[in-house]
Image (cartoon, helix red, strand yellow):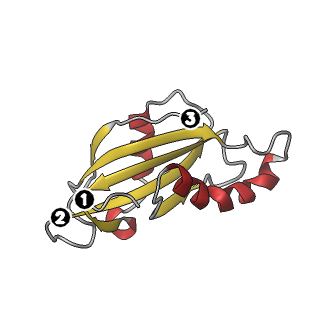
């Protein structure tokens, strides 16, 4: 199961506007049928960076937000966010980008609500990377 959508802009508590560019959802344990979910969770977590790079190049910087205790959850959500200005530079033509990955068991919440909750777990300026606008994604 895969889906890509575009869901607009979020305003972070400090006033920064962040745009959700891309969103992807897929079943977490598709490659591990009939497995012990707790045992395969570390393997899945180790594969997340490569998977994100494959579906949303360049896939970095990436912050993975696993649940406190395994298993990970039935679904893996990945979102690409961008913002202007940069996280570390106020130079003209510089934006900032961040990829977030998290896990859950339900698809009932809106993409907007799930993305907002995930954004609340990170400090944008500490984890986003600057890029020159117009350079593309890799």
Callout 3 environment at 10 Å: few (<14), some (14 to 19), or many (20+)? few
- Confirm or deny contact between disc 3 and disc 2 (CB under 8 A): no
Q: Quadrant of the C terminus?
A: bottom left
| Badge 3 or badge 2: first in the primary sequence | 3
Establish if 50 lies above or below 89: above
- Confirm or deny contact between disc 1 and disc 2 (CB under 8 A): yes
Distance from the alpha carbon under mark 1 to that under mark 3 = 27 Å
Q: Quadrant of the N terminus?
A: top right
Q: Nearer the viewer, mark 1 or mark 2?
A: 1
Establish if 13 lies above or below 112: below
| Badge 1 or badge 2: first in the primary sequence | 2
Residue beneath the point at 37% across and 63% down = 123
| Badge 1 or badge 3: first in the primary sequence | 3
Residue 5 - label: none
Name the one closer to the observer, 16 or 96.
96
Name the one closer to the observer, 53 or 10.
53
Distance from the alpha carbon under mark 1 to that under mark 2 = 8 Å
Where in the figure is residue 113, as x and y percent of width and height?
A: 41, 36
Where in the figure is residue 73, as x and y percent of width and height?
A: 66, 42
Residue beneath the point at 43% across and 35% down = 111
Going by the image, does 88 lie left or right of 24? left
Kindly give the residue lying farthest to the top in the view shown.
Answer: 108
Where in the figure is residue 46, as x and y percent of width and height?
A: 67, 62
Q: Which residue is mark 1?
A: 134
Where in the figure is residue 2, as x and y percent of width and height?
A: 56, 35
Going by the image, does 78 lie left or right of 33? left
Callout 2 environment at 10 Å: few (<14), some (14 to 19), or many (20+)? few
Residue beneath the point at 55% across and 49% down = 102
Q: Which residue is mark 2?
A: 93
Q: Which residue is mark 3?
A: 2
Q: Nearer the viewer, mark 1 or mark 3?
A: 1
Q: Secondary structure at mark 3?
A: loop
């Amino acid at each position: 199961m895969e889906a890509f959508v575009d869901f607009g802009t979020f305003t972070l508590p400090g006033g920064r506007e962040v745009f959700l560019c891309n969103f992807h959802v897929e079943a977490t344990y598709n490659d591990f049928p009939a497995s012990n979910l707790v045992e395969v969770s570390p393997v899945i977590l180790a594969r997340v960076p490569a998977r994100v790079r494959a579906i949303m190049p360049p896939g970095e910087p990436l912050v993975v937000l696993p649940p406190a205790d395994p298993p990970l959850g039935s679904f893996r959500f990945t979102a690409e966010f961008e913002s202007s200005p940069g996280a570390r530079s106020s130079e003209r033509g510089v934006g900032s980008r961040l990829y977030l990955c998290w896990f859950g068991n339900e698809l009932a919440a809106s993409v907007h609500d799930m993305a907002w909750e995930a954004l609340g777990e990170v400090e944008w300026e500490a984890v986003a990377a600057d890029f020159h606008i117009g350079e593309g994604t890799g």
